[in-house]
Image: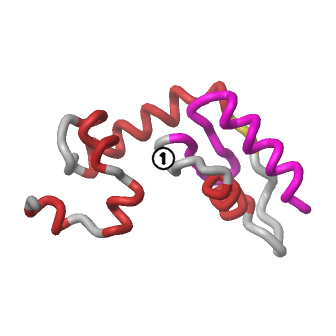
Amino acid sequence: MTTDYKLRSETYLAMFPDDEMVETFGHLTPSPSERNAFFFDCWMEWRINRLKLPKKHARFNPETIALAIGRDIGLRQFWDFQVKPGEVRFKDEGEMALFKINWDTDYHG
């Protein structure tokens, strides 16, 4: 077992799996700026697969609901979808369609 593994928490490993990190960055522990640049590029590339979220309401936070639905349908945050205030973007249109079906079913705003 390497020291790198010991320094990465279970939460980090769940969000940034070893296989994805090596495939994407060529090593297990990219710097925060490397990660930020990669995921920002994804955000920009995924613009075509975006959904606008409703404004916040006293009863609910649409970003929190979007994160929960994404996880519930098996999408991985950052890798398959990203949520920012007022918007969610997807890696591909199939993931967006599945999310939309669940949003329309589950969202009662």
Residue that protrudes farthest toward the bottom in the picture: 58
Vertically, is 94 above or below 76?
above
In the image shown, does 45 or 13 lie closer to the viewer? Answer: 13
Where's residue 59, x and y in %?
Answer: 83, 74
Q: Which residues are magenta?
A: 80-109
The residue at 76%/49% (across/down) is: 53
Where's residue 41, x and y in %?
Answer: 43, 32
Vertically, is 44 above or below 12?
above
Residue 25, quarter of the rendered image: top left
The residue at 30%/43% (across/down) is: 19
The residue at 47%/33% (across/down) is: 42
Q: Quadrant of the N terminus?
A: bottom left
Secondary element at image label 1: loop
The stretch drawn in magenta includes residue 88: yes
Disc 1: which residue: 78
In the image shown, does 23 or 39 lie closer to the viewer? Answer: 23
In the image shown, does 8 or 54 lie closer to the viewer? Answer: 8
In the rendered view, how is the structure colored?
A: secondary structure
Position of 58 compared to 63: left or right?
A: right
The residue at 17%/67% (across/down) is: 7
Where's residue 79, x and y in %?
Answer: 47, 42
Residue that protrudes farthest toward the front in the picture: 1
The stretch drawn in magenta includes residue 27: no
| Amino acid type indicated by mark 1 | Phe
- Crowd tier of the residue under label 1, counting other residues whose Cα lies within 10 Å: few below 14, some 14–19, many 20 or above: some
